[in-house]
Image: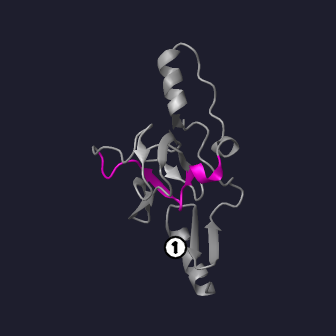
Amino acid sequence: MDIRKVKKLIEMLEESAIDEIEIHEDKDSVRVSRNLNAPVAVHAPAAAPARDIQAAAQHSTAAAEPAPAPEPAEAEEPEDNIVRSPMVGIFYEAQAPGKPSFVELGQTVAKGDVLCIIEAMKIMNQVESEKAGVVSRIMANNGEPVEYGQPLFIIRDA
């Protein structure tokens, strides 16, 4: 990556309200951060509850009991069942506000079906299913930021 581009990124960061920017260009990547002491989030915050079929069933049968904390998807699922965010951006579960979600829990999807949209730099990027199966878990919340590689969905074989 050209050093002039990196300098321009630094200037843009200083002039804006954002604290960090990461750019991937071919095989090169650069991350520019305003605050080096700030921790970098790799996954969604633990406060954001994952939605899954089992949790929905537990909630309906045992409303008075506290639900156990959800476990990380990586520990319990084969890698090919996890749909990860292809970029940093904002997760949207529908085409527009007020429109139905692309997918719901328990819905059967085919390879190539749109699961969600990730908005990055004012560009709406569709995330498609790489396999056929059933949506068993939605791990991101509508309108919230997601990180590159963050688990978004779990698609189990039908």
Q: Nearer the viewer, residue 144 or 107?
A: 107
| Quarter of the image that includes the N terminus | bottom right
> Which residue occupies 62% across, 64% down?
34
Q: Decide if residue 60 is in sight here.
A: yes
> Which residue occupies 58% across, 79% down?
26
Q: Residues within 10 Å of mark 1 (few under 14, many from 20)?
A: few
Q: Nearer the viewer, residue 131 or 104?
A: 131
> Which residue occupies 62% across, 49% down?
43
Q: Which span is picked out in magenta?
A: 78-97
- Please determine whether, in this image, residue 158 is positioned above or below residue 6: above
Q: Position of residue 31 (x, y in %)?
A: 63, 69
Q: Nearer the viewer, residue 37 or 28?
A: 28
> Furthest residue to the left?
98
- Please determine whether, in this image, residue 51 is positioned above or below residue 115: above
Is 14 magenta? The answer is no
- Please determine whether, in this image, residue 61 is positioned above or below residue 145: above
What's under tag 1, amino acid-wise?
Met
Q: How many marks?
A: 1
Image coloring type: one colour
Q: Decide if residue 42 is in sight here.
A: no
* Residue 27 located left or right of residue 135: right
Q: Secondary structure at mark 1?
A: helix
Q: Nearer the viewer, residue 77 or 18?
A: 77
Q: To which residue does mark 1 refer?
A: 12
Q: Position of residue 87 (x, y in %)?
A: 53, 62
